[in-house]
Image (spheres, grey):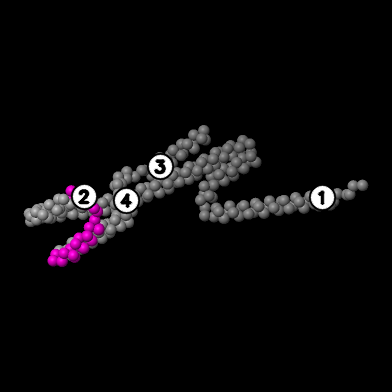
Amino acid sequence: MRLLLVIALVALAGCKSKPVDEPLPKQPDAPTKPDVVATLGKDLDKTDHRVASALVAIERNADKPKVVVAESRLAQSYLPQPPEADVAFAMARATKADPVDYQKQMAFGRQLATAVNKAWEKLEAQQAEALRVSQLKDARIAELQKEVERVKKDASSQTWTLVGAGLAVCGALCVAFLGPRIGLPLLLCGAFCGSVPFIIDSPWFEYAAGATLVISCGLGLWWLADRVKDSVNKSNDEPPQA
């Protein structure tokens, strides 16, 4: 019967616990640490700036073939090796030297650069959202851990209260039918059991427990020393055998 009551109390504690919050949003497939995206972005910006600066130097020194070749090679060192098909396409464009083709390719280049910038901004936004959701998950985990600890603590307190109430009822019945000599100790035990949760939660519990342990050890040592002393005195008082 008591076991059923304990189970019922634990179930009620679970029913009264804080309701589950709304589901967390889906975390984007992006790194949660901003340093990853920031470092990569700085490296890409540095590469783009170096290549763009070399191209500006080529344009401003078009009458100096050696400078043009040197700056061209320098710009290529910051870029991956292009496929042969793209190289052939560029060579054909240079041989033709049609201004219309250059205008088309410049428009395509601007569109591509705009698309890349938008994709990069989207990646940064996804990284920020991934960090936000990750922090929400960490907070939810910490909250659930606190809730589990609270439920365990409530269940333990209710168990002690139930045991104390049972002992108090038994003590009252014993006082009524068997006398206070039997019932009063049960009543005191019931009161003690009911106060255990408050004693444990008290900030003075550790000090009281430590003092009790020290006193118990002292009494034990005193009892042991007294027994040894009595044994020695007893042996000294015995008359010598003939």
Label 4: element kind: loop
* Residue contact at pointers 1 and 4, CB within 8 angstroms: no
- Tell me the kind of residue under disc 1: Lys
Where residue 99 appears, as percent x and y from the top left, is: 7, 56
What residue is shown with label 4? 31
Q: Residue at x 18, y 54 (%)?
A: 113
* Residue contact at pointers 2 and 3, CB within 8 angstroms: no
- Tell me the kind of residue under disc 3: Lys
Tag nearer the camera, 1 or 4: 4
The CA span between labels 3 and 4 is 38 Å
The CA span between labels 3 and 1 is 66 Å
Q: Residue at x 11, y 53 (%)?
A: 93
Q: Which residues are magenta?
A: 61-86
What residue is shown with label 1? 234
Q: Is residue 178 above or below residue 200?
A: above
In the image, 79: left or right of 141?
left
What residue is shown with label 2? 83
Tag nearer the camera, 4 or 2: 2
Question: Is-magenta flag for residue 54?
Answer: no
The CA span between labels 4 and 2 is 31 Å
